[in-house]
Image (cartoon, rainbow, N blue to C red):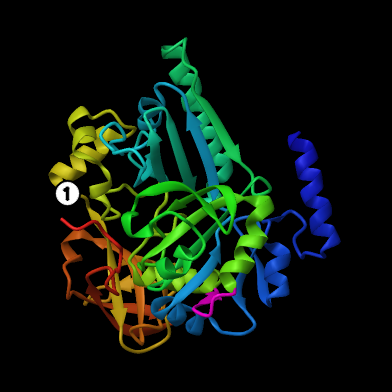
Amino acid sequence: MFALRVLKVAKVALRRGLADAKAEVTALYDFHVENGGKMVNFGGYMLPVQYADQGIAASHLHTRSSASLFDVSHMLQTEITGAGCLSYMESVCTADLQNLPANSSILTVFTDERGGVLDDLIVTKISEEHLYVVSNAAMKLQDQAHLLRALEEHKKRNAASDIRVKFFEPQERGLVALQGPHAARVLQRFTDVDLSRLYFMTSTEAAVCGSGACRITRCGYTGEDGFEISVPAIKAVDIAREILKEEEVKLAGLGARDSLRLEAGLCLYGSDLTAETTPVEAALTWLVSKRRRERSDFPGADVVLAQIRDGSKRKRVGLVAEAGPPARHGTPVLDGGGDQVGSVTSGCPSPTLGKNIAMAYVPTALAKAGTRFKLKIRDKLYDAVTAKMPFVPSNYYTKPK
């Protein structure tokens, strides 16, 4: 079956004349082309970086002021079912799933025995015996192998386990993100679920545009209010067309998605997070829940807990530069004496702020907000200063306290 699927994808790629025949396509590929999407290979999938009717900055600002629809079907969607699935999943991540309420979602990380981050992911606890997981497309094969190895170990310890892990391919499930301050107003027109009762990082099954078997999760990657909607792939185009008819909504691509998430202070795996960084170094200590710290029962706990106790040698920080070109991945970060003390992991112009922003890892002693650095870009030095993240305040729809 797997070989047939690969063959089918390859034939589709050749028929459509893709530059990289190894790249897969989502159910919305033709829809993107039809709407002027500039297609690129991202994480092994052909996705739009932007659209012909607006540039990246315009798309970014439209998301901040209204609502944008993103195709994120390349993300790996996984369903885990069966008694004991919570303890199984906790064996590979840092989240407290036991105490997570039903139909709630949580950001967490896979860690290795050195405390390194293998991937970041969102886990939704549907019930005590049902989890829905979204992780990164670029780490798809690694994540699948990681979960299956963990399942083998779990079943060695629990011979009667009935846990099942289902990985959805883009030909089975699509995933679209509707993001922006008007997202809820728009989506409410297409579902009978009362979205005013669906708060940030909560999830529900729903019908969307008349299509059942959908899951709406109030989350996203932009810092704005919004939703990720998992849909049957066969219905993805119909749903996207209906939502796009609304005057508040425009399509947005990878370019805007990246600048939005950077303004929101959110990490990109492979750039800001890697197996060489720990949650503490990445300023994500909050992902290690109190119960898991007390139990010290996640991979790499000894390393991570020691860093929580004693501090880490380096830390992820935000940088703002008033002038010069944007600092890109790998840009050297220099201290006042001209010595390189770190490097940029992500950077871009901020359409909202009108300045250049970046993330970098620097010595913890230099991580305080307001610390000044020099960025070395094409053999020239430009001033930068550390700033608190998010760079732009988040607008999540949270439950009143």
Which residue lies at the image location 23% right of the left edge and 49% below the top edge? 286
In this view, the residue farthest toward the top is 159
Percent position of residue 131, x then y: 43, 36
Q: Which residues are magenta?
A: 245-251
**Between residues 304 and 14, which one lies in front from this camera angle?**
14
Question: Residue 112, located in which quarter of the rendered image?
Answer: top left
Q: Is residue 120 visible?
A: no
Report the number of numbered marks.
1
Q: Residue furthest front?
A: 192
**Residue type, label 1:** Gly
Q: Is residue 27 left or right of residue 226?
A: right
The C terminus lies in quadrant:
bottom left
Q: Is residue 188 in view from this perspective?
A: yes
The x, y position of residue 198, in whole percent, is 34, 54
Q: Position of residue 348 (x, y in %)?
A: 43, 77
Q: Quadrant of the N terminus?
A: top right
Compare residues 290 and 241 and report the one nearer the observer.
241
Which residue position is annotated with label 1? 311
Residue at 59% across, 76% down: 50
Q: Is residue 16 left or right of residue 90?
A: right
- The local secondary structure at tag 1 comes to loop
Relative to 306, does residue 332 appear above or below in the rendering?
A: below
Q: Nearer the viewer, residue 288 or 51?
A: 51
**Would you identify the image quadrant in which residue 36 lies?**
bottom right
Q: Is residue 300 left or right of residue 261?
A: left
**Residue at the image point whose x is 73% and y is 73% from the top:** 34
Counting from the top left corner in percent of width and height, residue 85 is at 41, 26
The answer to if 250 sits in the magenta stretch is: yes
Q: Is residue 392 magenta?
A: no
320 over 264 or under it: above or below: below
Q: Residue at x 49, y 32 (%)?
A: 80
